[in-house]
Amino acid sequence: MRVTKRDWIQKSTIAVMLGTSLLMFAENGQAAAASDDSQLSGKAEQVAALAQSLLGKDYKYGAEGPTQFGSAGLATYIFGKVGVTIEDTIAELYRSGKTVSKDQVKAGDLLFFSSKGTGNPNFMGIYVGNDRFIYSSQGEDEVVEKRLSAYTGKLVGVRSFLTDGTGTSNPAPVKPPVNNDAESKGDKVIEAGKKYLGTPYQYGSTRSNKDTMDCSEFTMWAYRDGLGIDMGRGGARSQANYVKQHGHYTYDMKQLKKGDLVFFMSYRGWKESDYKGVDPLKQSITHVGIYMGDDKLLQTFSKESGGVKITNFSDTHWEYRFIMGGRPY
């Protein structure tokens, strides 16, 4: 089915892909006024056409092409191809660009969605016109096309990085300085940790080999392999103390950076209500993982879960169990 779709795309012209009218949708998902395609910039047409040409490509977390794409990586790759440099994470893209009203969405705009319909986005796509957007789907494991009207309940924001009618990029937004060294170190930790994906979980692992791991042995090896930092052979609480003594830490999830260790209290239940009234700072740390950015965790926590794996963070029991996070340097 993929081959057929791509063949069709290759035979289609940009004019057909974009159509002669552009439907725009308000927050309630109803059609708003149509927009003449003649008002679209040349770069917007290029972005839409490139997105269409990548349908069926494989999903891979954090990938930026040319054959595999993460959620943000798809946009970063496509915009780069048309000469517009943008950020490479959902969080950074959501904070930058020009805010666009949901009923004024145009081809080339970036769409940001939250699985729960509110709060920070955890996946994103590119609007290509005619009630269609394209994104790299983790669930479907490939780049797919969807109707925007079917997703308006999850749409939390729209951002434009193209100037109407001109095809030139917006001026770069003023942003606080980025600690590139910290970002680079975080990437190294994540890459080191991803080498152990699928490694079986064993509670109280001996740390004498890498055949099995518990949560803190996994983070121990990720930091040793990635940055040469030895936090000792202790458990999650020991690593939290090491972070407090030697590094930087925060109690605010929004302040976490890629590669940070994240620490959690004991599991209580699946619902947010199970944690109401619980003061995280008075709880004991029982688990540790690694924050990957874009609302993802790299961790291991049970035999049944399949060992070291990537999981969601927000709107899960991990969010409600969060105590603190930070890096040991």
Image: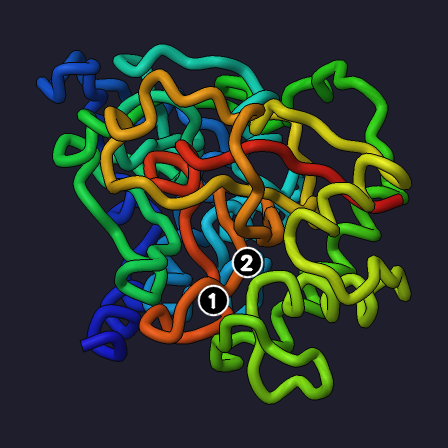
Query: Compared with residue 273, is residue 56 higher up or lower down, i.e. above or below?
Result: below
Dot 1: element = strand
For marks 1 and 2, the one nearer the N-term is 2
Q: Picture coordinates of residue 24 (x, y %)? A: 22, 21
Residue name at image x 60 percent, y 77 percent? 205
Residue designated by label 2:
298
Q: Nearer the viewer, residue 72 or 201?
A: 201
Q: Residues within 10 Å of mark 1 (few under 14, many from 20)?
A: some
Q: Position of residue 43 (x, y in %)?
A: 53, 36
Q: Are marks 1 and 2 in contact (CB under 8 Å)?
A: yes
Residue type pointed to by label 2: Leu
Residue bearing mark 1:
309
Give percent across and percent down for residue 151: 19, 34
Residue beneath the point at 76% across and 51% down: 186
Residue 91: name its quadrant: top right
Q: Which one is in front, 151 or 97?
A: 151
